Amino acid sequence: MRSRPEPVAAGVAVALVWALLCAGVRTAAAAGGAGGVVLGPDLEPVAGAQVALTREAAAGSGPAAERRTVAAGADGRWRLDGLTEGAWRIRIEAPGFHPAEGAIAVAAGEPPLEVRLRSLEEIPPGAEPPAAETVLAWLERGNELLAAGRAAEARAEFERALPLVPPAERPQLLRAIARTHWLEEGWAETLETLEQAVAADPGDAESRELLAAVLGALGRAGDLDAVLERAAAAAAPARPPVEPPRAGRAGRYRTRFGAASPLSGIDTYRRRFALDRDEIERVDPAAGRYDPAAESFEVYVPPGEPPADGWGLVVWISPSGRGGFTSPEIQAVLDERRLIWCGADGAGNRRHSWYRVALALDAAHHIARLYPIDPARVYAAGYSGGGRVASSLVLLYPELFRGGLFLMGVNFYRPIPIPDRPGSSWAPRFPPPPAEELAAIRHGSRLVLVTGALDFNRAETRRVHEELVADGFAGATYLEVPGIGHYDRLDRAWLERAFAALDAPPPAGGS
């Protein structure tokens, strides 16, 4: 049974107070030291990183302000001794990385501090994006390199600017990227990029003309109409109408189930997430009540007969208001692995988490009534904020979900130190499961954490995976895709790797 932690016993509280009083006897002038290691995002040592420690002057007659600096060695390690014990601010700077800042305690016996810097190419949450002048400099540099015939270098400049330019300018920039591929005789990449330019603005005449010219040069002029039709579909994918559910139906459709799952009640949510009703009502006047008959879901069922043990099921939690997918690569992977997809509409990041959880539970409940489902292959999956919700579903509803795919976002059940913010932690977003359930999840579930090398959630995703491994999760997989950021799609190869890890047999010793 889930419950809040018990209050600290009186005897323990007295011991804590006595320990604090004894600690206060130490003189403020005592000398201590601090040290640690500075690493890059791939855990490589950052030689020469500048470490600055500052202790502010205390009010009144306290000690004067102190500042000490040191450069990290070739192995990324640094050390400063003879410091006044107490609280210090730390700042670490190195070329090519965002500065790291935080607070540390200087005292005898403090363990070495590990700080992981973030690449300048990654925009951390809450950080200011590059100024317009910086983006313009990237574009100008790209144009210079393109004029000099240095295609790969030009493309790198253009691609770093692509997520930051206004939507109206994306077709022009994509055309420039297509030219870099053309110079390298990357015909398929040229066509793919021009197709993206048309999808970004189907009315852009220059992109359409350039696409037609390239197809003509490649002897494929007859493919133009099909490519334009595909680009238009990518720009505004059709949304199926809502229809009544029908058992065994294949293909893509939208439906309403009309009833809630037995697990979807707000009281079940409160118990599992250790929340009081008052806490929910403070932010949600409806207190978690919703009309199941008003909710719609997007469903995809692969063609053909179900596997002998039943279909697998992916319950999708979207960060946006649409529960379906638009990627043909995802559909191909679902077909190959015989997985049904079901996601709730209107369950994006702006909706309270208790509704998003409830609708995911409704999806799993009703799909299992319409199709033969293998209970060992029921998964929660999501992207960004949806991945964070999915991670809580797998750990707090293990009787239903046997694995999870968390793309560019994941939560954990205890605080995790932020690698480049000493003294700060990512807060737990849900309580740990009961011990017996947690043991079963460790040995019987597959948890797949996917991030990009430039994803602003990369550092947190990697640290959560490290915590899962330390906690004995035998089926935890970490996949980091080179060169992509938070808003980039996974290609077919990486999708296949992610779903292969999700859909693998339970870890050794699992069930």
Image: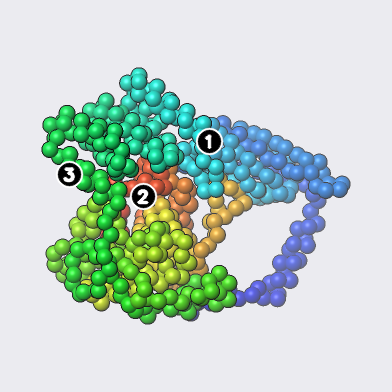
Q: Element under label 1?
A: loop
Q: Residue 246, image x and y in percent? A: 21, 74
Residue located 29% across and 29% down the image? 179
Question: Mark 3 = which residue?
Answer: 226
Kind of residue sitting beneath label 2: Leu
Location of residue 248 (image quadrant): bottom left
Q: Is residue 178 left or right of residue 449?
A: left
**Residue at the spot 23% in from the left edge and 62% down from the top edge:** 252
Q: Residue at x 64, y 34 (%)?
A: 70
Image spot of residue 77 (x, y percent): 57, 38
Within 10 Å of the Cα at label 2, are there few (<14), some (14-19), or many (20+) other Cα atoms? Answer: some
Of the numbered discs 3 and 2, the one sitting upstream in the chain is 3
Task: Specify the amino acid type for callout 3.
Answer: Ala
Q: Earlier in the sequence, mark 2 or mark 1?
A: 1
Mark 2: which secondary structure?
Answer: strand
Q: Which residue is mark 2?
A: 479
In front here: 504 or 191? 191
Q: Earlier in the sequence, mark 1 or mark 3?
A: 1
Which residue appears at 42% of the width and 35% of the height?
Answer: 161
1 vs 3, front mark:
3
- Determine the CA span between mark 2 and mark 1: 31 Å
Residue 98 circle label: none
Q: Is residue 275 visible?
A: no
| Disc 1 residue crowd, few under 14, some 14–19, many 20+, Cα 10 Å | few
Nearer-the-camera pick, 57 or 140: 140
User: Which residue is denoted by mark 1 in the rendering?
Assistant: 131
Using a 10 Å C-alpha cutoff, classify the residue at mark 3 as few (fewer than 14 neighbours), some (14 to 19) or many (20 or more): few
Seen in the image, is 42 located left or right of residue 4? Answer: left
Depth order, front residue of 233/273: 233
